[in-house]
Amino acid sequence: MSRLIECITESLEEEIEEEHYSLENLGKNILKKVRSKHSYQKGEISFVSELPIIKKTPKSKKRTVELHEVFVKVIHDGTWKKVLRVEVIGNTLCPHALEFSGKTHIQRAKGALEIECEFEKDITLEEMIDIVEESFSSEVYTLLKSEDEAHVIETMHKNPRFVEDVTRRILERSKKFGCRARAECISYESIHRHNVYSEGEI
Amino acid sequence: MSRLIECITESLEEEIEEEHYSLENLGKNILKKVRSKHSYQKGEISFVSELPIIKKTPKSKKRTVELHEVFVKVIHDGTWKKVLRVEVIGNTLCPHALEFSGKTHIQRAKGALEIECEFEKDITLEEMIDIVEESFSSEVYTLLKSEDEAHVIETMHKNPRFVEDVTRRILERSKKFGCRARAECISYESIHRHNVYSEGEI
Amino acid sequence: MSRLIECITESLEEEIEEEHYSLENLGKNILKKVRSKHSYQKGEISFVSELPIIKKTPKSKKRTVELHEVFVKVIHDGTWKKVLRVEVIGNTLCPHALEFSGKTHIQRAKGALEIECEFEKDITLEEMIDIVEESFSSEVYTLLKSEDEAHVIETMHKNPRFVEDVTRRILERSKKFGCRARAECISYESIHRHNVYSEGEI
Amino acid sequence: MSRLIECITESLEEEIEEEHYSLENLGKNILKKVRSKHSYQKGEISFVSELPIIKKTPKSKKRTVELHEVFVKVIHDGTWKKVLRVEVIGNTLCPHALEFSGKTHIQRAKGALEIECEFEKDITLEEMIDIVEESFSSEVYTLLKSEDEAHVIETMHKNPRFVEDVTRRILERSKKFGCRARAECISYESIHRHNVYSEGEI
């Protein structure tokens, strides 16, 4: 086992000295180096990280930093494949209650998009995050001045959605990638103790 | 160590054959039995469980089972003490946005009440749960027919609360116990990625 | 959603009044009841539990209760299938160091066996636990008197094993079931900060 | 709330541009900046990180990188205080079985040292890690060639220890700091399903 640990450690240390265009490329280079030192039939490397995206708040146009969970896996078994996954916080506003009683309930939701494709496919984590964010009742922000908060609330009320609506929208917008995509949405219901969950695949 | 494990196991097995009025009493009996077999200077036993409470939904009057997290610790170091803690799901409706823009945001919140007192003090987990539930914008239910849902939404809109309001109300209502009480409220904000947290003690 | 929750709650409450031969049967009955009340294309129910097994310690023949993690999933999509999984604590004693230096290192390991098969297949969680336990360097006990401890240590030294040996043995012994089986072993190394992991499938 | 978030974000962004001698100093500067923008009675900031330490393996003298969990909290309520905590992986070799039967069992253990003191006290996380590492039966390494592995095994056999021995040694060596110290050790027993735990304070 010590040779395997040595070659993983060396490969990691060599690669983190270099600049990389993406986590996928870093992963591929590490797997290549490991293989040249210690042959394998199938190799996988996984990264879990947070991706910060700098935005402007919708009305006051203040600078805000938004963090998203991202997962990248590179697989080498003769061919090269990758799995990309983003998890994004948003919200749902219940269409049923809005229609039934004029008022409604709102809650935090988390949406996920996972794509599995050949390594060379050109898909960025940033565009995946956009697809999920645009599928909620509204996107959310770390910083919100009062006028921004009013705008977010207005947006939510214009876009009532169930979790299954969010999942369908994510999948609809992911068709353009032309590969296997899986979407999930979980809502932390504000009127129930339980969460509500939806998943789908294309 | 084997004698300690034997006496803990035996004490547990003897006690779970008996009926107990409360988790505290079960814990006290186990600590007493352990002590008679294996002396100690300080002994503690902790229980983590879910307490089901059967209720009627507010309008349709259907039977619904609500689960709450409860924690009980019994401490014996010459005197007998206990720590009781409940964690209850509810919600907050933002007073600031409601006032500022007429519409507002709503989210799930979790409230906690923890009480530390002499063992003999007569406090039930059920009344602690009631105190936390009544401190939210509204209580929540596992089962809600449309008319119940409308009622819950109405109640939330009548009781806009920040997390610090929830914490203060829990503490206010816990004064009657006449002992050290600690309250917490965390809200899973629907317009932010972060949670908002409040805590206090009397 | 309220109708779904009502029918799940009712089905659960009716079924837990009955005696069941196995978790699988309980799950199947619940899925059947839910379907008669609220039709679905595919239904799944999962149970996570601890299964206590009462044994005698190897030498002093004392009674000891051993707890194992078990997972049962029942799937209904026209046909009935089930997934059974057990996770069992044991240990590995390093063969390499024993040969190289006469002394060696020992550590806790966790083995898992997961079987996916048609519902009617007759496999018990207890025999799955046996298969995993017998694949370690030695089985472990909650209670061990000094003579039992010496016996366990002796057994470990007679059966030096790497994690990949444990995985292979689990799979070898699972062939008799004649269905898809997956085995894993993870060791919490006593000479390294990292864990060592092995997995395989038949 | 938006002003608090703005001032925390700004303070963080300004400070991470600077070089800092320690996590404590980074924390103190952030708390100072936050206070100048948004007054508070009591402020706390906590860091959770991994501290990599580069070492040589004991015999083959290879370079190896060892990661340790570290926690730093800075508290400002008029005076400045700090809490430093390290968690270090090691092992215990059972003295009882070694004496009773010549052979013994060995397992991974995790030791912790937590120190609470005035901010100006000069204590490094590195010396705290050293104290915990030297208290085990042996220190552990990410990389071990066969000769290093034999050396680690030899060291463990020369230093049989229970978890309570590890805790006592950590506290004994922490007396020199002259402040409140708390030590813990947990062992992931290789012959039992349960862990064994010890804690103490000076």
Image (tube, coloured by chain):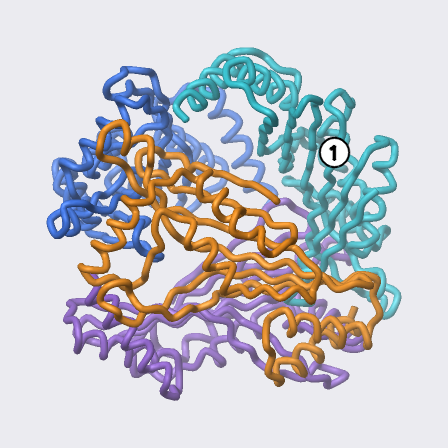
Chain colours: A purple, B cyan, C blue, D orange
Q: Is residue D74 visible?
A: yes
Residue at 24% x, 70% y is: A6
**Horizontally, is C140 left or right of B160 in the view?**
left
Q: Amino acid at mark 1?
A: Glu
Residue assigned mark 1: B116
Disc 1 sits on a residue from what chain? B
Q: Quadrant of residue A73?
A: bottom left
Residue at 25% x, 32% y is: C139
Q: Position of residue A57 (x, y in %)?
A: 70, 81
Q: Quadrant of the N terminus of chain B?
A: top left
Q: Residues within 10 Å of mark 1 (few under 14, many from 20)?
A: some
Q: Position of residue D151 (x, y in %)?
A: 24, 55
Camera-side residue of D170 and A44? D170
**Horizontally, is A138 left or right of D61 in the view?**
right
Q: Position of residue D119 (x, y in %)?
A: 69, 65
**Horizontally, is D60 left or right of D88 in the view?**
left
Residue at 88% x, 65% y is: B99
Camera-side residue of C135 and D45? D45
Q: Position of residue A89 (x, y in %)?
A: 58, 66
Camera-side residue of D138 and B113? D138
Give the number of marks: 1
Q: Quadrant of the C terminus of chain B?
A: top right
> In the figure, D162 relative to B158: above or below?
above
**Secondary structure under the numbered disc 1 in the rendered image:** strand
> In the figure, C99 relative to A120: above or below?
above
> In the figure, B46 relative to D21: above or below?
above
Camera-side residue of A6 and A143? A6
Q: Is residue A151 visible?
A: no
